[in-house]
Image (cartoon, rainbow, N blue to C red):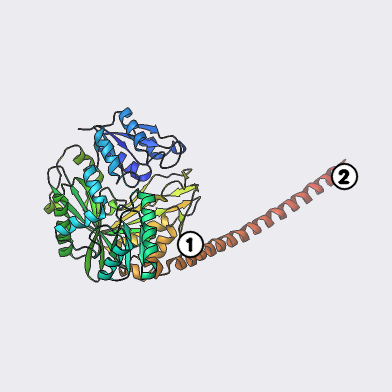
Amino acid sequence: MPVTVLIANRGEIALRIIRSCQLLNMKAVAIFIDSESTSQHVKMADEAYSLGDGTVQETYLNIKKIIEIALKSGADAIHPGYGFLSESSEFAKNVEKNGLIFIGPSSTIIENLGDKIKAKQYAKEVGIPTIPGSVGYVNSLEEAEEVVSEIGYPIIIKSAFGGGGRGMEIVKSHETLEISLMGCQTISEQFFGRKEVFIEKYISAPRHIEIQFIADNYGNTIHLGDRECTIQRMHQKVIEEAPSFLSEELREDLGERVCNLARNISYSNAGTAEFLWKHGEVLFNEINPRIQVEHPVTEMITGIDIVTQQLRIATGEKLAYKQEEIEFRGHAIEFRINAEDPICSFYPQSGTITDLRIPGGNFVRFDTFVTPSSKVTDKFDSLIGKLIVWGENRKETIERSQLALKELSITGLITNIGLHRAILETEEFNIRDLTTDFLERNNIQLILANYEKSKLAAVYSVYEKHKKKLDTFQMHIQQKRTMNNRWKQQSKLEQHDNR
């Protein structure tokens, strides 16, 4: 059983993994760039090794350097977290080649699921509906035109090995088809090292649904229900909930199909199947072979520690649960707290946190790596924390979230806390009128701008009130000084007269 785990990540997910390691009496090894040598994950780990300083490619994406540190530290396993190298089959392959355990599915599974065409085929084999589109890669304009003639416009061209919202082009007419195809191929090669692309029917403003599943090395597989991840900006999730709006029957049916898919390909460890929902139809999108940023909402409604399960499975243990033992209770919402300016196109922010007030109370959780005096850099993703709130039902969770967001305060740089407050105030959010274009449809940035103005007005009002008090106080002080000076002058005259 491995006793030493190297965490090939940083920030809040590194802390999350370290805590699970400590719970299982495993030794945790952290890696860091020199400018983050005092970060919380470095302080909490049993050991920490520097990656030096440089670009992300030279540090957290440097496979050779990370493997060297793992071997030097005596690590038995590597947990990639999310982002960075978590979906790199090359990284997983190098981990396996050096006799270490990759905490996630095998490199072969990651490679196969990274090919979105193969992933769609796996879904079809277990009866999961997929989005209409090309059967294989599209390499030329002629092939693209042939697909379009079958499914019609609008379409979306996607990188077959892409992710993170990159390598996608929406095409609404034939006039832009060729240039969009070439552009997508170029971006795909630039960011993912592969120029293969495919075409799907573009589904505008759907809902984004996920199924969380876990599998061990012995063929045992369970699902932990669904998540709603519809509210997004620039293809990046902003708010996640569990459960989603699916009926219990549909949730169980979809969950079982996902488990069948995982069994068919001998999947091991935690994973997430993503779907698009439109007009009552659930369509397969992709599988993410890693832990998700939003996993805490699933933990809150099931009581299952997913990261701890990842570690146990990687060390050879069987799944601790059977499907019939999984119970869903209440509702949970996660708010991604980002260092970004929602009013100015979500532009990333950097700076030093001068003050941090974390909300408390029952069923409120805040996962973060920042503290007062922490320096936030724009080198990495803008995520600095996750506020997770649970309630007996969605209404209670929203009410509790409003209080928690009111209490949460981060000063020193701009964050999107105000954005979350504004979203919760909309009628659409409260009645679950959610689509991926929620922010644009509700003109949420205008709402936020008005919110910020009202906040500034309130601050100015308080300032004016205290300024008047201060002016009055200063006036009294001046009067006392004047009286005191007069008294001193009078005293001197009296002393002179007495002489």
Image coordinates for residue 121, horizontal then vertical, percent: 19, 57
Task: Please give left or right for residue 333 compared with residue 407 in the image.
Answer: left
Location of the C terminus by quadrant is top right
Q: Residue at x 37, y 58 (%)?
A: 184
Read off the residue under disc 1. Answer: 343
Image coordinates for residue 241, horizontal then vertical, percent: 29, 59
Task: Please give left or right for residue 275 compared with residue 239 in the image.
Answer: left
Q: Nearer the viewer, mark 2 or mark 1?
A: 1
Observer able to see residue 403 = no
Image coordinates for residue 164, horizontal then vertical, percent: 35, 54
Task: Please give left or right for residue 454 compared with residue 486 in the image.
Answer: left
Read off the residue under disc 2. Answer: 497
Q: Disc 1 residue type?
A: Ile
Q: Is residue 474 above or below residue 368?
A: below
Image coordinates for residue 205, horizontal then vertical, percent: 32, 68
Location of the N terminus by quadrant is top left
Q: Is residue 355 above or below residue 117?
A: above
Q: Residue at x 40, y 68 (%)?
A: 440
Q: Disc 2 residue type?
A: Asp
